[in-house]
Amino acid sequence: MRDRDEQAYIVIERDSGGGIGSFVLGALVGAGLALLFAPKSGAETQEELKERARQLREAAEERVREAQRQLEERLDAAREGVQERFETVKEAVDAGRQAALEARKELEHKLETSKAAYKAGVEAAKEVLEEGDETEAEAS
């Protein structure tokens, strides 16, 4: 059996210069062949490119209009939602205000009733005290 060191080697050397020149030459040859085998003339090709560009522009404009329409619909829906919430909050505030006014009126009525009862109690106490003083005066 042979060792690995005894195997024959093949060395391939390459010249690393001139890669750009080959590329340019290939590009020129390709462009020339494309012009020779092109099915349409330059004017026809330009016209076709213009037509395709116009179609692309129209399609893009249509997409923009559609996106704008969808955005406007969403904004309108959001505005309606905000308006509904505003109305709900306004109704709640009005109901709270009305409840506060009613509670205040009820409290004022109770306060007036309490004051009247207090005054009546004071008057009754004075009368009892005056009667007690008269009874003591008669007893003496």
Image (cartoon, rainbow, N blue to C red):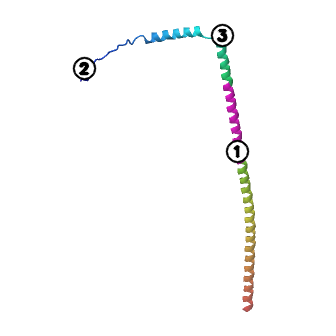
Q: Amino acid at mark 2?
A: Glu
Q: Which residues are magenta?
A: 59-85
Instruction: Count neighbours of disc 3 (C-alpha within 10 A) and say few if under 14, some if 14 to 19, many if 20 or more.
Output: few
Where residue 131 appears, x then y in whole percent?
Answer: 75, 85
The tag earlier along the polypeptide, 3 or 1, is 3
Mark 3 vs mark 2, CA separation in Å: 68 Å
Looking at the image, the residue that sits furthest to the bottom is 139
Which residue position is annotated with label 3?
43
Instruction: Please tell me whether mark 1 sits on a helix, a strand or a loop.
Output: helix
Q: Which residue is mark 2?
A: 6
Task: Please give the residue where the numbered disc 1 appears in the rendered image.
Answer: 81
User: Disc 1 to disc 2, how far (Cα)?
Assistant: 87 Å
In the picture, residue 129 is in which quadrant? Answer: bottom right
In the image, is 78 to the left or to the right of 10? right
> Count of labels shown?
3
Tag 1: amino acid = Gly
Q: Is residue 90 left or right of residue 49?
A: right
Residue 58: quadrant of the picture: top right
Closer to the eye: label 1 or 2: 2
Measure the C-alpha gap from mark 3 to mark 1: 57 Å
